[in-house]
Image: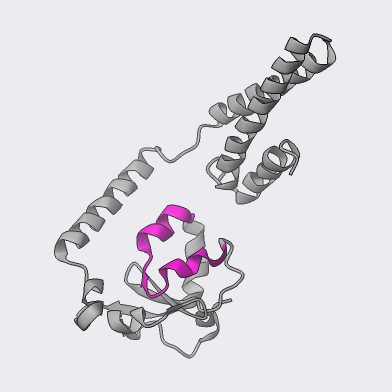
Amino acid sequence: MGKGGDQSQITSSRKISLEELSAHRTPDDAWLAYKGKVYDVSGWKDHPGGSVIFTHAGDDCTDIFTAFHPTTALKDLEKFNIGVLDESIIPPALLANKLKPDEQKEFERSYRELRAKLLAMGYFNASPSYYVYKVSSNFCILGLSIACAVLSKSILVNMLGAVLLGLFWQQSGWLAHDFLHHQVFRNRTYGDLMGLLIGGVCQGF
């Protein structure tokens, strides 16, 4: 766990400037800002997404966090809260670009409102019937490939079977991508299991 999760003595109401936030930008000393709060994830080697979390060390990660995490991840993030971001202090010299202009803030606000509306309209919800169709049709392709190899001695039919097998593997790769990025099920365990089946067993990994 990151250092922030172990620093219970630090009050979460402590004000942290942009300059101070920017100073903590290495894997072993990593602070992140999310929706005005600051989190210390230093040394969090067991982050489920791997070391990619450190690419935004010393910076704001609000939108990238929202794009790649379910809302249930917020309870884990709160363990690392060490304070609130204070943008009233103008950062000096080269760090001045950390202070977002009003136009950027307005753009981000509009973007977040749009995303919330799209979520409410169901545009981020996966279609179960679509994935049932895709998985079923993909296994039909595998069945045809096996039939071409087993039921015929014609080299042309056998070659057709090889092409179909390649298509099955190609489609399996994209399906595994969707399942392992947890686009299909709300329960991540189901996505992981389908990823192992489609991406592991079916592709021979």
Image point 84% across, 16% down: which residue?
150
Vertical placement of residue 67 versus 13, above or below: above
Specify whether 154 is left or right of 112.
Answer: right
Vertical placement of residue 28 versus 129, above or below: below
Image point 48% across, 70% down: which residue?
54
| The residue stretch that appears in magenta | 50-70
Vertical placement of residue 18 versus 179, above or below: below
Name the image quarter holding residue 190.
top right
Specify whether 143 is left or right of 121.
Answer: right
Our reading of the magenta stretch's main secondary structure is helix
Image point 48% across, 56% down: which residue?
69
Residue 185: in magenta span: no
Residue 49: x percent and y percent? 56, 61
Q: Where does the N terminus fall, quadrant-wise?
A: bottom right
Vertical placement of residue 29 versus 105, above or below: below
Q: Where does the C terminus fall, quadrant-wise?
A: top right
